[in-house]
């Protein structure tokens, strides 16, 4: 066996050596400190400043250490390193050979995520950079260091997970109390008063109303976005970059009618912090009349119905599925009295140029080869009939006795059946019974079915309530029409058609106009 010559190892930077009294066990090292405060409360901000001052003094007073900087992240959670800019800069400096040792207060300050913590310890150890955790007195270059690190990091992760759960439970409790939190800085149409309550911002509210009524009046979401952009109107984020997706979010946001749906999204887990749409995985909480409404409930509901119609189309009486658009005021309002299909607008160029409304089943043959033979209606004639229908409506309302109108309103308001409050109370009682039965290991099938039945009943009542509100709103709109046009309409007004006409049915010798308050008027045209 040949002679063995021992070549001593180069001193590892960051490795422990015999310390002098009152000295940390590191020699001739470029030392940086990392500190972090989890939140932005004032007292913790001062803790942040204290940490920075402490490490600056500690490193600079040690003659064998070379100051390599202070890296400090203020107000960022430790569960994920992606958003910790200073931390990432420090790691880059280590990889560039500018740091030999990192000093930090504790594992929880460095990372509360076991995977991240161990990853960076091992990455830095591979390039001979040590980390010293003051609180735990752990040096990552010691043989026992990584064992202790694994244990301590696991505890740190449990702590962060527990904190995340506590925060989540706190939010859930606030949801259950109906407490609504809105970032009003990016919420177009609202601001907050001195007490923190949502209040309407008048100028921005005009933009919201413009968006809703433009959609009702037939504009597409893209057309609305383009018009807002052209007029230089600012979005909630204070830019002029309007997109149809932004208009869509506004049109679907129940907060504009004064309500609030809580927990629309939820966090999958505390580590990734990824938020996803809540499709029934977590409970949701709906708070009615939480704050002043910009858009009346019936108008909001009308918009939701229109969005659904435009997305899905409709199935006509003759079983045909038709896509809808709101390009013209008569679009999706004119139907065939013979086959039930929708009327579509065509242009004729001979013997004169004129728009003509035709039954879709007349334009295109059915699979059996048959066409609907209902008449075509030229647009000028349709407009003329519409003006006549409005004038009959106005005349009828003028001559109607006020008491008759009051009775109609009373019938609409006093609909029979349980109220939403009564159903909610019943649901709550049955849910308590279900929990008790489950705890006692009893059969829960009957109670579960009862809850499902009550939920279906509640949906029907909600739908009925929406219809009632829409009808009341339509009556108010028609009353305004009567007041404004006491002497009748002279010119055709397409906005009135969009607002007040629900359906026009074309028959062989007449047209039937159904208004949104339920009134039906026949015009012989």
Image: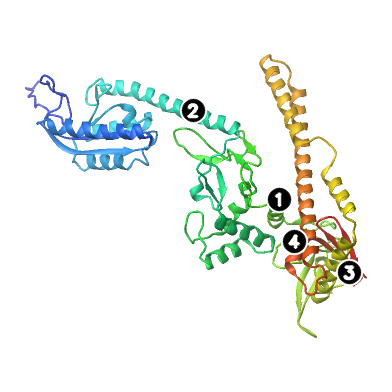
Closer to the chain start, of discs 3 and 4, is: 3
Q: Closer to us: mark 3 or mark 4?
A: 4
Asked whether, in this view, residue 478 is left or right of residue 284, the answer is right
> For the point 8% across and 24% down, which residue is it?
6
- Which quadrant would residue 369 be assigned to in this image? bottom right
| CB contact under 8 Å: marks 1 and 2 | no
Image x and y of residue 353, in percent: 76, 82
- Which quadrant would residue 85 be assigned to in this image? top left
Image x and y of residue 79, in percent: 39, 33
Which residue corresponds to mark 2?
165
Asked whether, in this view, residue 443 is left or right of residue 78, the answer is right
Q: Closer to us: mark 2 or mark 3?
A: 2
Q: CA distance from mark 3 to mark 4?
A: 27 Å
Q: CA distance from mark 2 to mark 4?
A: 49 Å
Image x and y of residue 385, in percent: 85, 71
Which residue corresponds to mark 3?
374
Asked if residue 268 is positioned above or below residue 318 in the image, the reply reads above
């Amino acid at each position: 066996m040949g002679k063995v010559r021992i070549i001593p190892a180069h001193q590892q930077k960051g490795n422990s050596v015999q310390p002098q009294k009152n000295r940390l066990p590191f020699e001739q090292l470029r030392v940086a400190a990392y500190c972090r405060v989890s939140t932005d409360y004032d007292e913790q901000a001062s803790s942040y400043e204290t940490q920075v001052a402490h490490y600056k003094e500690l490193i600079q007073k040690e003659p064998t250490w070379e100051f390599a900087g202070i890296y400090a992240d203020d107000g960022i959670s430790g569960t994920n390193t992606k958003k910790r800019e200073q931390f990432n800069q420090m790691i880059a400096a280590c990889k560039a050979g500018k740091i030999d040792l990192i000093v930090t207060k504790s594992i929880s300050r460095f990372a509360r995520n076991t995977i991240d913590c161990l990853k960076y310890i091992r990455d830095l150890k591979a390039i001979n950079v040590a980390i010293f955790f003051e609180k735990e007195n752990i040096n990552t270059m010691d043989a026992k260091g990584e064992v202790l690190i694994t244990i301590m990091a696991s505890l740190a992760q449990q702590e962060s997970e527990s904190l995340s759960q506590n925060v989540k439970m706190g939010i859930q409790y606030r949801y259950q109390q109906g407490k609504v939190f809105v970032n009003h800085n990016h919420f177009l149409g609202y601001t907050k008063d001195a007490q923190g309550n949502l209040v309407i911002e008048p100028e921005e509210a005009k933009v919201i109303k413009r968006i809703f009524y433009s959609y009702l009046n037939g504009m597409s979401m893209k057309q609305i976005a383009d018009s807002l952009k052209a007029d230089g109107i600012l979005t909630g984020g204070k830019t002029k970059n309007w997109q149809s997706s932004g208009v869509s979010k506004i049109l679907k946001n129940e907060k504009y009618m004064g309500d609030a749906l809580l927990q629309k999204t939820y966090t999958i887990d505390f580590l990734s912090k990824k938020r996803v749409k809540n499709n029934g995985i977590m409970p949701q909480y709906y708070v009615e009349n939480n704050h002043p409404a910009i858009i009346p409930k019936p108008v909001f509901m009308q918009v939701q119905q229109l969005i659904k119609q435009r997305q899905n189309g409709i199935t006509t009486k003759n079983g045909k599925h038709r896509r809808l658009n709101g390009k013209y005021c008569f679009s999706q309002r004119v139907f065939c009295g013979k086959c039930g299909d929708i009327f579509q607008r065509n242009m004729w160029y001979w013997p004169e140029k004129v728009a003509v409304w035709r039954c879709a089943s007349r334009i295109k043959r059915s699979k059996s080869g048959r066409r609907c033979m209902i008449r075509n209606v030229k647009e000028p004639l349709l407009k003329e009939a519409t003006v006549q229908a409005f004038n009959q409506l106005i005349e009828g309302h003028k001559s109607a006795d006020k008491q008759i109108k009051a009775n109609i309103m009373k019938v609409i308001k006093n609909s029979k059946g349980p109220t939403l409050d009564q159903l909610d109370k019943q649901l709550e009682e049955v849910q308590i019974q279900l929990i008790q039965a489950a705890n006692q290991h009893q059969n829960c099938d009957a109670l579960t079915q009862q809850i499902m039945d009550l939920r279906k009943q509640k949906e029907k009542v909600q739908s009925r309530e929406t219809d009632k509100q829409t009808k009341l709103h339509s009556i108010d709109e028609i009353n305004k029409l009567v007041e404004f046009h006491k002497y009748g309409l002279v010119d055709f007004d397409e906005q009135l058609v969009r607002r007040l006409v629900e359906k026009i049915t074309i028959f062989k010798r007449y047209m039937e106009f159904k208004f949104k308050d339920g009134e039906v008027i026949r015009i012989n045209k």
